Amino acid sequence: MDQGRVSSTSIILMSLLCMLVFHSNMSFAEEHIVGDGKGWSFGVQNWPAGKTFKAGDTLVFNYSPTSHNVVVVNKSGYDSCVAPKGSKVYTSGADRITLAKGGNYFLCGFPGHCNLGQKIAVNAN
Ligand SMILES: *[C@@H]1O[C@H](CO)[C@@H](O)[C@H](O)[C@H]1NC(C)=O
Ligand SMILES: [Cu+2]
């Protein structure tokens, strides 16, 4: 009898604990679809404005891999639309990139695309 009560109490406690952990994970890392419905596209440069990003959040870049890619650059690469040789390039068309704390800079490496606003600067807290 007593044992039955103890185990049902611990099951309830365990469930509460699981819900708590699940909940805090949910609010901890968010997923952001770059460009929302338009995806990774021309003019996406303004998409980050007014949004809040945290280190550990994920950016999802959706695009056609025959037309675009995603190159990781630094601030000077972002400002000048130049991707240095040896830069990390994503090409899947559905790339998931985890944000590091501070400035995160990405541009499309296809000729002319960055100058058409296919680049983003995201500051993660
Ligand atoms: C950005 O990257 C380039 C090429 O790797 C490097 O020469 C430059 O110093 C970097 N700039 C900053 C601000 O980190
Ligand atoms: Cu492009």
Image: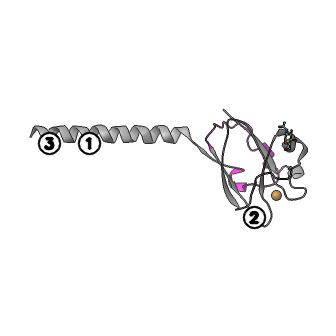
Mark 1 = which residue?
A: 11
Amino acid type at circle 1 is Ile
Split into 4 quadrants, where in the image is the C terminus? Answer: top right
Q: Nearer the viewer, residue 47 or 104?
A: 104
Which residue is at a point 66% across and 38% down the rendered structure image?
A: 53
Helix, strand or loop at disc 2?
loop
Mark 2 = which residue?
A: 65
Which residue is at a point 78% across and 67% down the rendered structure image?
A: 66
48 on left or right of 58 = right
Task: Please say if 1 is above or below 63.
Answer: above
Crowding at mark 1 (Cα within 10 Å: few <14, some 14-19, many 20+): few
Mark 3 = which residue?
A: 4
Q: Position of residue 27 (x, y in %)?
A: 52, 38
Q: Nearer the viewer, residue 67 or 36?
A: 67
On whether residue 36 falls in the magenta region, the answer is: yes
Most common secondary structure along the magenta stretch:
loop
Split into 4 quadrants, where in the image is the N terminus? Answer: top left
Please report whichever mark, 2 or 3, sits nearer to the chain's N-terminal start.
3
Residue that protrudes farthest toward the front in the picture:
86
Distance from disc 1 to disc 3, alpha carbons, whole Å, reads 11 Å
Q: Which range is magenta?
A: 34-57
Q: Are marks 2 and 3 in contact (CB under 8 Å)?
A: no
Q: Position of residue 61 (x, y in %)?
A: 70, 54
